[in-house]
């Protein structure tokens, strides 16, 4: 279908020629029993344009592209109506001169309707057939490189280029002392197309006048002219909005992607054209844990909440970092942060539990069954009674784990007792605390045994088939902004 119909849909998918929105097939009438009957039209749900605006209706709701082609061919001459130049031999008496055509057009009364002209495809087919015949008749050898199945593909041949150059250098040799050579026979000359059957097209002088009068009429006006964007995908002769035709949608391909290192398939869409699903979709977010962060509630509860937009310098603030695992294997996570953040404003960072494990993304019922067993005594307490401890996680669930991190914001230049200018020694966003974190994820997955469908019998063989995998990357945590001043600014 792509080869025969070009790069556009050959069935029922069209875009609006006015706003390029998708067109839908709707009916103009319905039977008493609720069944939909014709005629059918293409309508746009965005700009309310329909094919009724250009006088086109369809007999059935399918094969719209073929119906549009038949309507177009009925309004203009098709390529089958253009006869071959060898079908009916013509004589010079049958040809009208341009002067006689001008006199005939001058005597003809002016008409607002455009004359029926041959479309571009038919004219090109007629010219192509005519010049192929001329090449055959004027060729001196049947093996001439200019003669071929494709007109225009011979220009890349060196012998064809030599013959083209010889057409211009045949008479130049006499000027350089080559007059004593034996004269060669003059090759026959090709003639131009002389009739409409051969592809000749003489523009009607009244066509431009009709276009100008239509533009000046009250029915057309400025809104009736097609814009440059609308005429891009239309025939070159299109000038008015009522000449625009529905645009078949451009075809798109579904591509699979492989990894550059291991050639593993990362993305593989469904084969059905109407489906938007994927058979294989291994995206990076499926392997990178989802990280969320929130400040630890202050203790006691009567204390005011922490304002992340105004963090006080040198006052420790604790945050809870939660990592959620999307994979079906449990992972071991290592978080590494610098003790002091880079930049002009140095803030101290302490990760209380840098190494921990996150459970697999298993069934929800597994979490419900596991909750009936023994629980961590720290998890059973109230959230306000918990205290972050070094080397211990804060909370844990089925496929998520929460750890604590302590941050001591640094002091801004000129923000203390010195009383310096606010704009001295600080740039834009220097008061923002951003902590670089190096994340390392390790897990064990089945190796080649999974791909070869081999199931080890013993547990030792099964453990031998497990492959250790590792993923490491950097991320940046945005904590908040540091306010100017110290402890004296606390209310």
Image: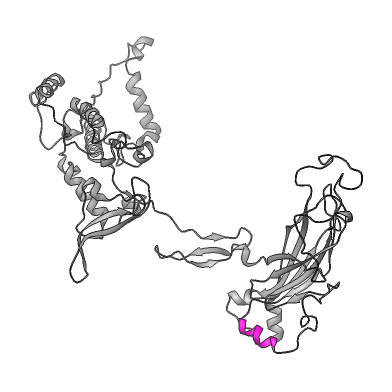
Q: Is 235 in front, or is 345?
A: 345
Q: Quadrant of the C terminus?
A: bottom right
Between 191 and 355, the one nearer to me in the picture: 355
Residue at the extreme front of the image, as rendered: 491
Quadrant assignment, res 284: bottom right
322 relative to 108 in the view: left or right: right
Q: Is residue 44 left or right of residue 38?
A: right
**Could you tell me which residue is drawn at 24 percent across and 54 percent down?**
66
Q: Residue, x 67% and y 71% (percent of image)?
A: 325
Q: Which residues are magenta?
A: 360-371
Q: Is residue 248 above or below residue 387?
A: above
The image position of residue 133, as x and y in percent, is 22, 35
Residue 458 showing in the rendered view: no
**Quadrant assignment, res 490:** bottom right
Which colouring convention does the figure follow?
one colour
> Where the N terminus falls, by quadrant?
bottom left
Q: Nearer the viewer, residue 176 or 137?
A: 137
Which residue in the rendered view is the most extreme toward the right? 418
On the image, the x and y values in percent for residue 246 come to 30, 48
């Amino acid at each position: 279908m792509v080869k025969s119909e070009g790069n556009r849909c050959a069935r029922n998918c069209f875009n609006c020629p006015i706003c390029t929105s998708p067109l839908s097939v709707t009916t103009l009438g319905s039977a008493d029993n609720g069944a939909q009957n014709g005629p059918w039209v293409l309508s746009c749900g965005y700009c309310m344009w329909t094919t009724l605006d250009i006088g086109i209706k369809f007999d059935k709701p399918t094969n719209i592209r073929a119906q549009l082609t038949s309507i177009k061919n009925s309004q203009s001459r098709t390529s089958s109506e253009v006869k071959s130049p060898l079908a009916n031999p013509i004589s010079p008496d049958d040809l009208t001169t341009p002067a006689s055509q001008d006199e005939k057009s001058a005597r003809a009364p002016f008409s607002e309707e455009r004359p029926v002209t041959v479309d571009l495809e038919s004219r090109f087919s007629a010219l192509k057939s005519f010049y192929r015949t001329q090449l055959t008749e004027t060729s001196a050898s049947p093996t001439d490189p200019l003669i071929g199945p494709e007109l225009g593909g011979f220009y890349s041949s060196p012998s064809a280029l030599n013959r083209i150059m010889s057409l211009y250098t045949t008479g130049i040799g006499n000027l350089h002392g080559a007059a004593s050579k034996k004269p060669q026979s003059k090759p026959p000359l090709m003639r131009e197309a002389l009739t409409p059957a051969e592809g000749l097209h003489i523009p009607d002088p009244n066509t431009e006048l009709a276009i100008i009068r239509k533009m000046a009429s009250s029915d057309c006006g400025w809104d009736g002219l097609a814009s440059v964007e609308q005429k891009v995908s239309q025939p070159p002769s299109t000038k008015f909005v009522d000449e625009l035709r529905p645009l078949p949608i451009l075809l798109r391909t579904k591509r699979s992607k492989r990894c550059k290192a291991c050639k593993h398939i990362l993305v593989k869409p469904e084969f059905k054209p109407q489906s938007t699903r994927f058979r294989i979709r291994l995206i990076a977010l499926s392997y990178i844990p989802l990280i969320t962060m929130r400040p630890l509630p202050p203790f006691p509860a009567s204390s005011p909440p922490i304002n992340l937009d105004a963090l006080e310098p040198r006052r420790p603030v604790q945050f809870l970092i939660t990592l959620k695992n999307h994979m079906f294997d449990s992972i071991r996570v290592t978080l590494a942060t610098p003790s002091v953040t880079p930049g002009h404003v140095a803030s101290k960072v302490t990760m209380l539990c840098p190494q921990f494990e996150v459970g697999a993304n298993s069934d929800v019922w597994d979490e419900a069954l596991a909750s009936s067993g023994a629980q961590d005594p720290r998890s059973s307490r109230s959230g306000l009674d918990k205290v972050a401890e070094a080397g211990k996680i804060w909370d844990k669930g089925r496929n998520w784990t929460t750890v604590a991190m302590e941050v001591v914001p640094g002091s801004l230049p000129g923000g203390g007792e010195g009383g310096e200018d606010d704009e001295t020694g600080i740039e834009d966003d220097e008061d923002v605390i951003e902590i670089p974190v190096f994340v390392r994820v390790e897990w064990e997955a089945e190796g080649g045994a999974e791909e070869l469908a081999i199931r080890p019998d013993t547990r030792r063989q099964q453990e031998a088939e497990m492959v250790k995998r590792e993923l490491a990357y950097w991320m940046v945590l945005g904590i908040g902004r540091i306010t100017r001043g110290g402890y004296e600014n606390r209310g």
